[in-house]
Amino acid sequence: MSDIDAIRSGDRRALARAITLAESSRPDDESRAAALLEKLDPPRTGSWRLGVSGAPGVGKSTFIEAFGLHALERGRRVAVLAVDPSSSLGGGSILGDKTRMERLARDPRAFIRPSPSGGEPGGVARRTRDAVRLVEAAGYDLVVVETVGAGQSETAVAAMTDMFLLLLAPGTGDELQGVKRGAMELADLVLVNKADGALAGLARHAVSDHRAAMALLRPRESFWTPRVETCSALTGAGMDAVWRTVGDYFAAAGIPDKRRSQVRAALWDEVARLAAARLRADPEKRALLTRLEREAAEGRLPLRRAAERLLDGAP
Ligand SMILES: Nc1nc2c(ncn2[C@@H]2O[C@H](COP(=O)(O)OP(=O)(O)OP(=O)(O)O)[C@@H](O)[C@H]2O)c(=O)[nH]1
Ligand SMILES: [Mg+2]
């Protein structure tokens, strides 16, 4: 059976191998991965791609497990992928050992992929995009991409998913100030998690604060006004409402158009990456590159001029 047929037929090991190949930054693996991706069916527009972000410990993994189990009951097949900005620096891994989402992981209708470790920063997002394509080809139609709320990973995840969920915890002081405005601006749904026990009251207050704050932001999508709700990933409270809100979003959204424009933007990222890699590897440019780098570093040549000369091959 070909790799593609094995993936299509639900062979989890073939799927895992294909994702490993897509995560590799070795040039020969990259071209094998591209050949594999080329053979995939066009992406399914019936799938839901959700980005989930939030500060460490806010409950992302617990939420994804609760939401994922909910989705399984409603006939979806669930894949969870992680974009972990720290792993590229040799740090920990979101889905590594801390939270295994054990109940979800045990279900044959779910596929959980730990975050890639190693590789150049920025490459993680690109490889996750390929992993989304692969899990969809294997029939998973709810793809959740988890990322810890740090730096550019949120922006990258929002740019590769259909709907972006931001999780906050009440009473941690990060209600308004600690959470970057940027993450709020990306969010289609803000969830104040841990709305249980002693934190329930605080969570309600946090919701009204965030609603007021969100009302001041310009909506990202013409078809959707971002919402703020509470939930408890631990008890499952509010999970039905979250499911309905996600359903409302997908009923309102023009997913094919949104994905087309995401792919256009990603294409230009890829072009820039490939062009830079080829220039760096070009033996004829090596001497020129060294000289231009030095002149730019010494402030003798504006960056724009250095880049132009490198591209044009001017002396
Ligand atoms: N009370 C309460 N605790 C929760 C809830 N959700 C998560 N927790 C707890 O919060 C802790 C962190 O949960 P995780 O799901 O691992 O959080 P995370 O955001 O995935 O954390 P990182 O992956 O480290 O960024 C765990 O001890 C959870 O049991 C909730 O809704 N209520
Ligand atoms: Mg986690």
Image (tube, rainbow, N blue to C red):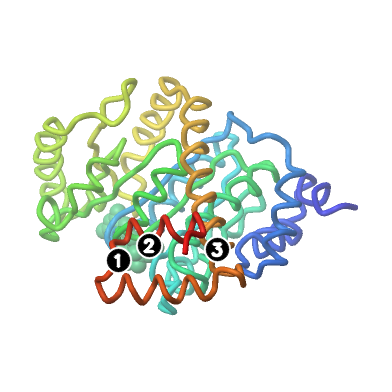
Question: Is the residue 266 above or below the residue 114 in the image?
Answer: above
Residue type highlighted by circle 1: Leu
Q: Earlier in the sequence, mark 3 or mark 2?
A: 3
The span from disc 3 to disc 1 (Cα, nearest Å) is 19 Å
Which residue is farthest bottom? 90
Relative side of 37 to 202, left or right: right
Q: Which mark is residue 301?
A: 1
Report which residue position mark 2 lands on: 306
What residue type is disc 3 on? Leu
Q: Residues within 10 Å of mark 1 (few under 14, many from 20)?
A: some
> Which mark is first along the chain, 1 or 3?
3
Q: Are marks 1 and 2 in contact (CB under 8 Å)?
A: yes
Identified at 62% across, 72% down, the residue is 283
Circle nearer the N terminus (1, 2): 1
Q: Secondary structure at mark 2?
A: helix
Q: Which mark is residue 274?
A: none
Q: In the image, residue 227 lies at what x, y percent?
A: 25, 32
Name the residue at 49% across, 52% down.
272
On the image, the x and y values in percent for residue 46 come to: 58, 29
Residue mark closest to the camera, 3 vs 1: 1
278 or 57: which is nearer to us?
278
The Cα–Cα distance between marks 1 and 2, rounded to whole angstroms, is 6 Å
**Which percent across, then down, holds residue 132?**
58, 48
Instruction: Identify the mark at residue 279; answer none if there is no mark.
Output: 3
Name the outermost residue toward the right. Answer: 1
Viewed as shown, does residue 76 lie left or right of 197?
A: right
Give the residue type at disc 2. Ala
Question: For the residues carrying marks 3 and 2, which lies nearer the camera in this image?
Answer: 2
Residue 43 image offset from top left, x and y in percent: 64, 35
- At a point 64% along the width and 59% down the height, the residue shown is 22
